[in-house]
Image (cartoon, helix red, strand yellow):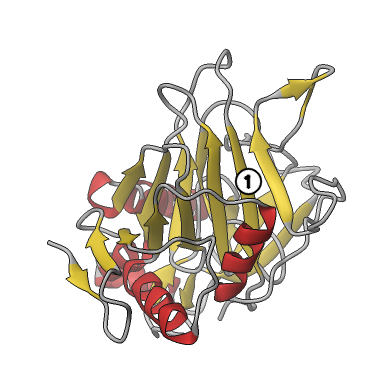
Amino acid sequence: METALRETPAALAVRPLSPALGAEITGVDLRNPIDDALRRAILDAWHQHLVVLLRNQTLDEDAQVRFAETFGPLAKVSSGRKYSEKHSSIMLISNIRQDGKPIGALPDGEMHFHSDQCHQETPAKATMLYAIEIPSAGGNTLFANTCLAYETLPAETRQLLAGRRALNAYQTDTTLRSASYEGAGSSYWHPVVRTHPVTGRKALYVNRLMTRRIEGLPAEQSDAVLKQLFDHQEQRGFVYEHVWRPGDILIWDNRCTLHARTDFSAGERRLLRRVTILGEKPV
């Protein structure tokens, strides 16, 4: 059932995408400027549902960047690679190759659950992805609600995690968890449980791709607890799986969600345009 958002144009509506998280917003053409009332409505829906989707959009770089700024200041691409002549915040996610080299980052195959930039001192608050070319099957994005994951942990596990930090480490263009994190290009310790600065909800802030150890626990216990947490937060009841269509634009909250990617054929083209929004240090 669609429900009109408070203080917004009558055409705008929000439809939940799954019981766990996610909502589709309809009645908005992102080629047009967003006024304050519409901005507040979109942010309200985002904070409530953690992931929002708008379909059938036709966006050039300028329009996507303008919409992304609704959520806050944009982050520059940190790899040093240039994807846009005009916008330093734009990254391409693509398996398309020119002269044998991918035109984008993270080109191929499956990717384990993670939160963008959790290996940095100040991770991204949000990520926006716009679909341009999509394979006929696969390459879906899965989103996990880490607030629900935390809230459904046994009390003794929540007590064990209280006040602890975890080490997050990333090796460039790695899409699956590696056996070792030696040589990681970037790493940082963050709280295992973080508090959302707007909603006040607590969320697990660990992930299968990059979280390596929990502070203050022996190595074997840390490994066992992390495996328990990974398996718990990735269960299907906490996950929405998005099947992309060209013209889709999704924005997710990295502070309370994880995302992953399913495998797809290397013989089909996949091209999406990404922008990230600056965040705050997790607490």
> Under tag 1, what secondary structure?
strand
**Could you tell me which residue is drawn at 65 percent across and 33 percent down?**
94
Looking at the image, residue 156 lies above or below residue 173: below
**Residue 138 seen in render:** yes
Q: Position of residue 216 (x, y in %)?
A: 57, 68
**Could you tell me which residue is drawn at 39 percent across and 70 percent down?**
46
With 267 as the anchor, is 241 left or right in this view?
Answer: left
Residue farthest top in this picture: 267
Q: In the image, what residue type sits under mark 1?
A: Arg
Residue farthest left in this picture: 1
Q: Position of residue 111 (x, y in %)?
A: 53, 36
The tally of labels here is: 1
**Could you tell me which residue is drawn at 75 percent across and 41 percent down?**
172
- Neighbour class for label 1 at 10 Å: few (<14), some, many (≥20)? many
Looking at the image, residue 144 lies above or below residue 281: above
Please name the residue that numbered disc 1 is placed on. 273
**Could you tell me which residue is drawn at 57 percent across and 59 percent down?**
127
With 87 as the anchor, is 250 left or right in this view?
Answer: left
To which quarter of the image does residue 181 belong? top right
Q: In the rendered view of the protein, which quadrant contains the C terminus?
A: bottom right
Q: Nearer the viewer, residue 269 or 81?
A: 269
Q: Position of residue 142 (x, y in %)?
A: 40, 44
Q: Position of residue 44 (x, y in %)?
A: 37, 79
**Residue 118 seen in render:** no
